[in-house]
Each structure stands twice: as structure tokens, then as C-alpha cells.
Amino acid sequence: MAAMNASTLSNDITPASELLNLMQAMGSKAKMASAQVARAPAAIKNRALLGLAKLLRQNLAELKSANQRDLDRAAAGGLAGPLLDRLKLGVKDLETVALGCEQLAAMPDIIGEIIGMKEQPSGIRVGQMRVPIGVFGMIYESRPNVTIEAASLAIKSGNACILRGGSEAIESNKALAALVQQALMESGLPADAVQLVPTTDREAVGMLIAMPAFVDVIIPRGGKGLIERISRDARVPVIKHLDGNCHVYVDDPCDIAMAVNIADNAKTQKYSPCNATEGLLVARGVAAEFLPLIGAIYAAKGVEMRCDEASAHILRTQAAIVSVANIVLATEQDWYEEYLAPVISIKVVGGVDEAIAHINRYSSHHTDAILTRDHLHAQQFLREVDSASVMVNASTRFADGFEYGLGAEIGISTDKFHARGPVGIEGLTSLKYVVLGQGEIRS
């Protein structure tokens, strides 16, 4: 059977009037719940997060069983390999989101904090208070752990959320959402603060993104097609990234052993995440030493290398250690590609200036890294690469809310407004001006 993507799996069809009533009811409940969560004390929100972490660990067997039903159905439906990988919910995945809940609970509550308070010539004092956004809608594919990441961040940031996961993960998401609502109720918060759309009917997405009376922002997390559709059709603001074409640039000079280790990890630790490296740029001065070493590793792991002429020549002369079958010449499209698979583009560049120019032209402005011993090159790369995360001597796989100490992430934004990079608590808040006076009037 031919492979298919997540959107081609069968889904429920609900009568339009019934579906509209469902979505409007969910929106109304979320709006009411958001007011209660927004004023909840930090201790109550933290109690819900710690309770959720406990419930996740107590219900591993049930969650694994629900996830296996999704995996079996998706495999039978011909879901493509990278998407099947994203759908898996292992013990390690569940422990990571449980730890994320605990990390969030341990973090300070920023809701209500006032910053930048300054007295003006008139005598009034003006500052800004951090407040929840209100209600966000989350639309995502495959990854069921997103259900917990979104829910936990909603709780900590004092927001309500409506979650619409992919049809391929419906059983996993229902099981996880039930635990979230149990944790909310046991802590004294409204269960409607986190709701999962119970139908897989695709029309629910169109309705969710067109409810400005109830939803304040939409956050899509998935394939490029999904995000382009949401960005085009939404009637509420959207926090988004289209894809994750991330790069590692191996500079001259660099620590070759370190560079090999990082380039290996950034590509092969896991192929399907958006922070996996898709493009490898190598300075000409180190290419002859570096490329055979990383090429042997990639070949052994079955990674296809789509190379420019210079890198292909170096690798092909090392046929004793690098399988020539893994080397093909790159096309122009390869420099733009997000593979999400054991495929990587490789190009030899003249140095840091050419690497930066290549990245700013072809990357998706998600995450890009330089591996170098030159401090000035590192600083130039940090300043000039126009991406949401820019790294020095570290794997792009670290571009993640949990790894950044945010507790979890709602997604990674490549937009340039208030939320950019991994979106954690602050990205789900807004600032309003507050003015303190003692009877002043404007003359």
C-alpha cells in the first residue's frame, strides 16, 4: 500500500449544524474557564501540574494501550514512517512530559508581575503587567505528547485552550486529555480550561480558526500544508512556523572530533523532529579531514547524502569507508528541503560569510549552529544568522522548550512578533499598561 500522510487517514463526519454547535459550546466554555484560570493563585495551578505529572506516571499501561491502538490503525492505513515515529508515545516520552509539568510547577508565576514602572513628569507612574492571552486553539498532527505540553503551559500561564490533535492520534489524545481534566478538577480548577475536540472531522479545524469571539490566538504545529492552510484561513492571530530546515556549519578552525559528534547527533539522534539538522555546511579548509569521518558514520546509519560537487568528490575518494551508494548530487531544491528522514544535504563553503549567506537564503529560520574555535566567527554567526535559535558548538536538537528550561513548549515560532523560538509561558502572555496615580489630572 502506498504511504500516505496524516491527513489522509479516515475521519469521522459530523453533520454541519451539530459540529458548529459543538465547537461554539466548547468556545463558550473555554472563555468562561479562562477567567477562572487567569485569577487562580500560583499554588492552585502548581497543584494541578504536579497532580498531572503523578497521573501520567500512574497510568502508563493505559496510555501505552491507547497509543498502540493508534499505531496499529495508522500502520494499517499506510501512514508514512516519519509520521509513525512521531505518533509513538513511549515511556521515555511520558516521563519527559511529566518532568516538564514538574519543571513548570517549580518555576515562578509571572502572571500579574509589573515591569518597567516609571514616574512621569505629570506624577503618574506607568508600567506594564503580564497577563494571560485568554483562550488559545492548538492544532497539531501526530505527536500526542503535544497534548500534555499544551495543557501544562495553558495551566501555568493562566490560559484556557482548545486542542485539536490529528485523527491518527485520537485514542492517545483522548486518554491524555482525560488525565488533564482529572488533574484540573482535583486541584479546584475548571475541567473546561483544557478541552480536546472529540471528533476527527476536518471541518472542526475550519470552525476553530474562525471563532474570534471565543479564541484569541491559534497555534498550528505540524506539516507545512497544515500551517499554510491555517495561516491563510484563520480569522484570529496565528503563531506559526512553516518547517524546520536547520543547518550545522563546520567552521575553519574547529575541533574536528567535537564537530563529528555534534553533526552526527544533530542529524541521526532522531530524524523526525523539526530541530533535526537537514543541511550540513563545511568550510573548505577542514572539508578533507571532516567529511570522510562524518560520511562514514552517515553511511553506516543509512543516511543518504545529497552533495554539491566538492563534497561529493571528497566523499567518493573515500570509498573504502564511505559507501558511494549513499552519495548523490544535490539539486537546487535540496538546499530548501526539510527531509524529516535519513537524508541530509552537504555543501562545501568558503568560510563563515558564505555559510551565513547560504543559511539566510535557504533555511526556514528555525535553528542553525556553528561549530568553531574562532570567537569572532561565533559572534558574527550569532549576530547575522536570521533564525529563531542560533547556536555555537551545540546540536540543533537542543532547540526545544524542555531543553531550554521552559518546562515545555507550545511550539517553535519563526515569526518575528512577541513569540519567537520555543514558545513557553511568556509566549502565551501579553502585556497591558497599568497607571498608578494620586489624583493627577491632565492639564
Image (tube, rainbow, N blue to C red):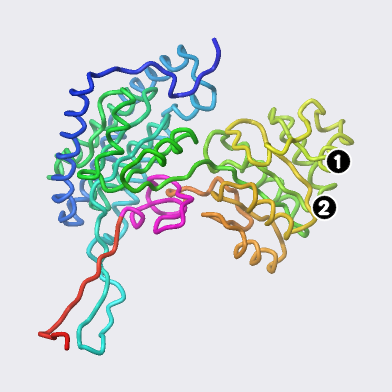
Q: Quadrant of the N terminus?
A: top right
Badge 2 local density, few (<14 within 10 Å), some, or many (20+)?
Answer: some
Question: Chief secondary structure of the magenta span?
Answer: loop
Whether the residues at callouts 2 and 1 have beta carbons within 8 Å, the answer is no
Provide residue 258's location: percent of width, then percent of height: 70, 51
Task: Assess whether residue 252 is covered by the magenta stretch.
Answer: no
Q: Which residue is mark 1?
A: 314
Towards the viewer: 300 or 197: 197
Q: Which residue is mark 2?
A: 284
State the residue at coordinates (73%, 30%): 300
The numbered mark at residue 296 is: none
**The magenta segment:** 404-428
- In the image, residue 419 above or below residue 177: below
Q: Quadrant of the C terminus?
A: bottom left
Q: In the figure, residue 245 lies in which quadrant?
A: top right
Tell me the element at label 2. helix
Q: Amino acid at mark 1?
A: Ile
